[in-house]
Image (spheres, coloured by chain):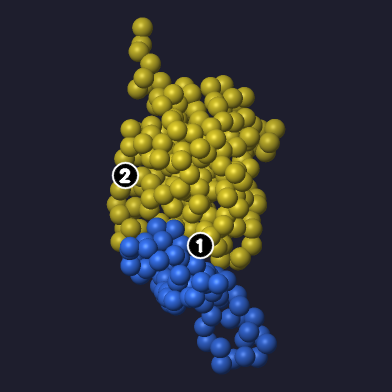
Amino acid sequence: MKFAVIVFPGSNCDVDMYHAIKDELGEEVEYVWHDAESLDEFDGILLPGGFSYGDYLRTGAIARFSRVMQEVVKAAQAGKPVLGVCNGFQILLESGLLPGAMRRNESLKFICRPTKLKVENNQTMFTSLYEEGELVTIPIAHGEGNYYCDEETLQKLIANKQIVFTYENNPNGSLANIAGIINEQGNVLGMMPHPERAVDELLGGADGLKLFKAIVKQWREANVIKA
Amino acid sequence: MYKVKVYVTLRESVLDPQGAAVKNSLQSLSYHEVKDVRIGKYMELTIEKSERAVEEVVKEVCESLLANPVIEDYRYEIEEAVAP
């Protein structure tokens, strides 16, 4: 399976993402610059964290208009797995691939620490290797992770089981303790915590690795012809 | 030429953590008459005259980029400016 790590000016978790895929997962991965005009050769798209375009105006607001985002939308429509982490999640929200928006953390502080997440939905291509209700430890690092959507959207998210991860101890004021949501089709996941930073016990935990393994497993089952 | 002033603020229904912090600070400075603070952004645009009505252009840029309609409202003032 071949992954693309999209790199915007100001991305800073791209190397972590690359490392997770190449060294821990053992799959193919390439950096793709924000002006790329095609993602056809890739099977999975990863939007890393950081401060794309300096977070000017709003987080993710400028990145959304970069050339490659047209291709990310196409890939999402084609059903390819698209994972946005942290700033990547914010970009997915701004681009309308996921519903809602981010506000400043309730405390107004940038929070950087491991958090306990609950797997609310393990019936997705990203979470199939977790148990339903499993608690996992994955670090967060953000100043704007306070998720918001209107009541109607929230009810829809709940009814469709689109809330994939919630915080056990809400760190930022996020609505309904939301840490990660998926689109209705089930192939675009946005989450504030960084699974790519939890892929090796040496780094303090490997709870994030299963998320990437699940993507590969699903892709293999769908695309590799069994002999 | 037009000089356009755009104000973007969080919607009334959306909690504004920055505004709440500033309100608390003002109250701790004993300005108890300050009941609410909302923080927003102020932008000045200079727009050239074209075949399109300036309001139409301003609304478009506000909705496509300057404000996020999920959480923000915008308002604007348009002034005709004399080119220097």
| Quarter where residue A70 is shown | top left
Of all chains in the rendering, the one displayed in yellow is: A
Q: Which residue is mark 2?
A: A184
Residue A103 badge:
1
Residue A216 appears anywhere in the view: no
Q: Chain of mark 1?
A: A
Image point (49%, 67%), residue name: B46
| Side of B50 where A9 appears, left or right | right
Q: Secondary structure at mark 2?
A: loop
Q: Chain of mark 2?
A: A
Of all chains in the rendering, the one displayed in blue is: B
Q: Secondary structure at mark 1?
A: strand
The amino acid on which the numbered mark 1 sits, given as a three-letter code, is: Arg
Mark 2: few, some, or many residues within 10 Å (few <14, many ≥20)? some
x, y percentage for residue B13? Answer: 40, 72
Residue at mark 2 shares a chain with residue at mark 1? yes
How many tags in the picture? 2
Image point (57%, 55%), residue name: A55
| Quarter where residue A75 is shown | top left
The amino acid on which the numbered mark 2 sits, given as a three-letter code, is: Glu
